[in-house]
């Protein structure tokens, strides 16, 4: 009996020593990694940037001045917002009577990680100026929003439309595969139906109460990070934990990207489609159709611009994430969906895919962040200028 107790105590001591050794080794590896691996910031965009308009859509905070910085892909990028909640655009034409072009979308339209002059909105405006074409571009992109928010944004845009104005909605893969409950669809119909003024000109206006409501708030995790430089990972769900660990551990950051590619390469070919509820694509194209109807009724033109993520247009990412083409029937999958749905929903659709496709990894995107870099923004502007405005390459 004593011999068994002694053996148990011996084994427990060894297991404790083994566990302690593993912890020490991991801490040492983490320390060494941090000497050579730069850590990204989990808060690259100021929390005060995105506020709620009284009409029910998220917009950029009026007259905001600040920078974007994720510590590795982009540093100190200028960010300027006007009084109406639209991002600053370069090369603006001074003639107030020229047709206006309102760009609506998420972070890929907004230009996350890019300075005001590097966004595809600014580059497109400069190309129109150089081609001596009229068009006053307004960048209404907002990071972190979706098609249902674009619908409510029409409550700001439609009342000021005049004949010849244009609305271009930048649609990403995140938009297309997000399912909207029937309550969201009904809310969208009511929002568009309640627009009293059918157009007729005027300036964009921002409406907000005295106490602004922010899309992102300063949580205890945020305050801890600002005070210590260490991010406590999220434990709400496995995906959130893995994503947040990239900002908490340099060792994990180094290995996660490759691990993620392996998971996607070897997962079941039907894993993605099984996660997308039936009718998801149809509902999103219905929302686009509802917007189109109101814009056209106000005398404007409505276009859908597909902005594919790098997992489509970057051949290296596509090979891994689509299992060499077995997951998506075509590499330009958003464009493929557009060809399937746009005609039946009466939508004019174009895709930036032909201008972004590359066999050089991360040529058009930030390596870690994944958003379009300046080269990608230039390619998009070139494609939009040609496909929608007829500017020769």
Image (spheres, rainbow, N blue to C red):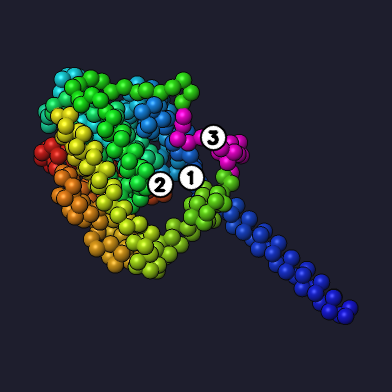
On screen, residue 367 above or below 211: below
Q: Which range of residues does the magenta coloring cover?
A: 213-230
Circle 2: is it few (<14), some (14-19), or many (20+) Cα within 10 Å?
some
Question: Which percent across, then down, holds residue 206?
Answer: 35, 23
On screen, residue 368 above or below 53: below
* Closer-to-camera residue (132/30): 132
Left or right: residue 192 versus residue 162 is right
Question: Which percent across, then down, holds residue 369?
Answer: 40, 46
Residue lying at 37% horizontally and 31% vertically, measured from the top left: 56
Is residue 310 at all visible to an observer of this figure? no
The quadrant of the rendering that contains the C terminus is: top left
Circle 1: is it few (<14), some (14-19), or many (20+) Cα within 10 Å?
many
Q: Are marks 3 and 1 in contact (CB under 8 Å)?
A: no
**Residue behind mark 1:** 40
Image quadrant assignment for residue 327: bottom left
Q: Which mark is residue 369?
A: 2
Left or right: residue 15 versus residue 50 is right
- In the rendered image, residue 229 lying in the magenta stretch gets the answer yes
Image quadrant assignment for residue 16: bottom right
The quadrant of the rendering that contains the N terminus is: bottom right
**Between discs 3 and 2, the one toward the N terminus:** 3
Question: What is the secondary structure assignment of the residue under circle 1?
Answer: loop
Q: Which mark is residue 218?
A: 3
Please tell me how many numbered marks the rendered image carries.
3
Question: What is the secondary structure assignment of the residue under circle 2?
Answer: loop
Residue lying at 59% horizontally and 57% vertically, measured from the top left: 29
Judge depth for marks 3 and 2 and give the one in front.
Answer: 3
Q: Are marks 2 and 1 in contact (CB under 8 Å)?
A: yes
């Amino acid at each position: 009996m004593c011999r068994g107790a002694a053996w148990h105590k011996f084994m427990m001591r060894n297991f404790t020593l083994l566990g302690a050794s593993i912890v020490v080794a991991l801490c040492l590896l983490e320390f060494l990694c941090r000497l050579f691996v730069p850590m990204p910031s989990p808060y690259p965009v100021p929390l005060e940037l995105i506020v709620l308009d009284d009409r029910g859509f998220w917009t950029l905070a009026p007259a905001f001045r600040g920078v974007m910085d994720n510590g590795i892909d982009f540093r100190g990028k200028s960010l300027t917002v006007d009084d109406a909640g639209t991002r600053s655009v370069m090369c603006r034409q001074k003639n107030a009577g020229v047709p206006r072009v309102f760009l609506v979308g998420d972070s890929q339209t907004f230009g996350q990680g890019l300075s005001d002059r590097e966004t595809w909105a600014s580059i497109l405006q400069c190309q129109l100026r150089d081609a001596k074409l009229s068009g006053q571009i307004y960048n209404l992109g907002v990071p972190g929003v979706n098609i249902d928010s674009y619908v409510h944004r029409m409550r700001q845009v439609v009342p000021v439309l005049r004949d010849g104005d244009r609305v271009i909605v930048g649609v990403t893969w995140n938009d297309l595969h997000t399912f909207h409950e029937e309550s969201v669809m009904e809310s969208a119909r009511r929002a568009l139906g309640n627009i009293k003024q059918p157009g007729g000109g005027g300036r964009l206006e921002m409406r907000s109460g005295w106490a602004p409501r922010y899309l992102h708030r300063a949580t205890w995790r945020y305050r801890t990070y600002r005070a210590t430089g260490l991010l406590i990972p999220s434990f709400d769900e496995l995906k959130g934990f893995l994503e947040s660990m990239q900002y908490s551990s340099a060792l994990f950051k180094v290995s996660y990207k490759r691990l993620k590619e392996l998971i996607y390469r070897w997962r079941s070919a039907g894993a993605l489609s099984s996660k997308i509820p039936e009718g998801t694509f149809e509902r999103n194209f219905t929302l686009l159709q509802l917007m189109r109807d109101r814009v056209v009724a106000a005398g404007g033109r409505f276009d859908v611009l597909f902005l594919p993520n790098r997992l489509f247009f970057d051949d290296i990412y596509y090979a891994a994430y689509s299992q060499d083409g077995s997951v998506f029937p075509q590499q330009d999958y958003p464009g493929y969906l557009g060809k399937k749905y746009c005609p039946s929903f009466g939508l004019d659709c174009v895709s930036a895919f032909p201008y972004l496709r590359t066999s050089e990894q991360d040529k058009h995107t930030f390596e870690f962040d994944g958003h379009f870099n300046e080269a990608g923004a230039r390619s998009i502007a070139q494609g939009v200028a040609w496909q929608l405005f007829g500017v020769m390459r």
